[in-house]
Image (cartoon, helix red, strand yellow):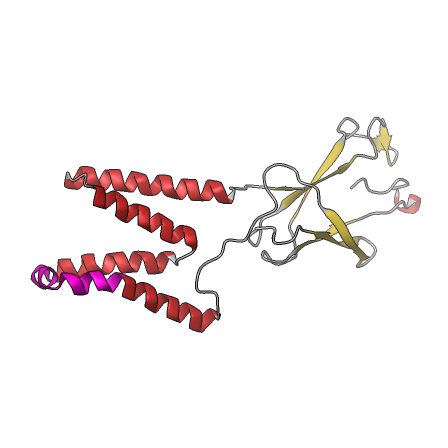
């Protein structure tokens, strides 16, 4: 099974860090200041996001002092301690409201995604026929993993090709006689953070009366 259009968690973090490094460099070029403190601030932003601090809380806490400086530079210079204290105060306030609304989930958590761009095996743990043509399939995911799929994303299922090497299938020319495996795309019906992957697929059994004596392939 393969997830389509995937970016791994490691790739996400590397891309985010790279974009921050570019922002650091460009800002230093503009202000002509290459002090180490600027690198430390942006590296700190990355580390905060890495551990799960909300991006909104991070950026609001950093933009608030800049906004105050634009509004009243004199007050800003006279109250440096207060201004610096605003940053952790915003984080604490954001954490409190997150705790109030979400319970114990103060930090954002990225689910460990099992499905990637390379094929991975999944164990079928449940199969239930819904009607004459639809079947519900449930695949087990390893402990601690989720699919990591957002709503609307789909996966590609690979299965053995029962018609391989056959010139005809269901009394018609076989257009898939060469592949060793068949590939079909489906949109999961399970939640993105569910510990299992649910699919509803079409399954046609042999029915000579309908013109399909060998049934569907996959």
* Observer-nearest of 1 and 136: 1
| In magenta segment, residue 164 | no
Q: Position of residue 200 (x, y in %)?
A: 72, 53
In magenta, the rendered stretch is 72-87
Q: How many marks?
A: 0
* Observer-nearest of 96 and 27: 96
Residue in the picture at 61% in, 58% down: 191
Up the image or down, 116 lies above or below 130; here it is above
Residue in the picture at 32% in, 50% down: 44
Left or right: residue 96 compared with residue 132:
left
Residue in the picture at 12% in, 61% down: 76
Residue in the picture at 29% in, 62% down: 88
Up the image or down, 68 lies above or below 218; here it is below
* Observer-nearest of 73 and 34: 34
| In magenta segment, residue 77 | yes
Quadrant hosting residue 169: top right
Left or right: residue 93 compared with residue 82:
right
* Quadrant showing the N terminus: top right
Quadrant hosting residue 101: bottom left
Q: Residue furthest bottom?
A: 100
Quadrant hosting residue 166: top right
Q: Position of residue 207 (x, y in %)?
A: 90, 46
* Observer-nearest of 215 and 147: 147
Q: Main secondary structure of the magenta part?
A: helix
* Quadrant showing the C terminus: top right
């Amino acid at each position: 099974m393969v997830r389509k259009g995937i970016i791994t968690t490691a790739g996400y973090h590397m891309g985010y860090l790279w974009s921050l490094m570019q922002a650091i460099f460009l800002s230093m070029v503009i202000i002509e200041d290459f002090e180490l403190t600027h690198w430390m601030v942006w590296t700190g932003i990355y580390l905060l996001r890495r551990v799960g601090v909300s991006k909104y809380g991070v950026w609001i806490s950093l933009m608030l002092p800049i906004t105050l400086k634009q509004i009243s530079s004199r007050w800003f210079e006279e109250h440096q301690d207060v201004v610096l204290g605003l940053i952790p105060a915003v984080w604490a306030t954001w954490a409190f409201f997150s705790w109030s609304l979400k319970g114990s989930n103060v930090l954002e958590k990225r689910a460990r995604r099992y499905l990637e761009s390379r094929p991975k095996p999944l164990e079928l743990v449940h199969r239930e026929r819904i009607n004459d043509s639809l079947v519900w399939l449930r695949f087990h995911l390893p402990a601690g993993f989720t699919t990591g799929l957002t709503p609307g994303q789909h996966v590609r299922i690979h299965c053995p090709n029962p018609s391989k090497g056959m010139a005809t299938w269901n009394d018609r020319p076989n257009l898939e006689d060469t592949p060793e495996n068949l590939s079909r795309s489906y949109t999961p019906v399970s939640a993105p953070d569910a510990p299992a992957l649910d699919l509803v697929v079409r399954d046609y059994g042999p029915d000579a009366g309908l013109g399909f004596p060998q049934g569907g392939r996959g």
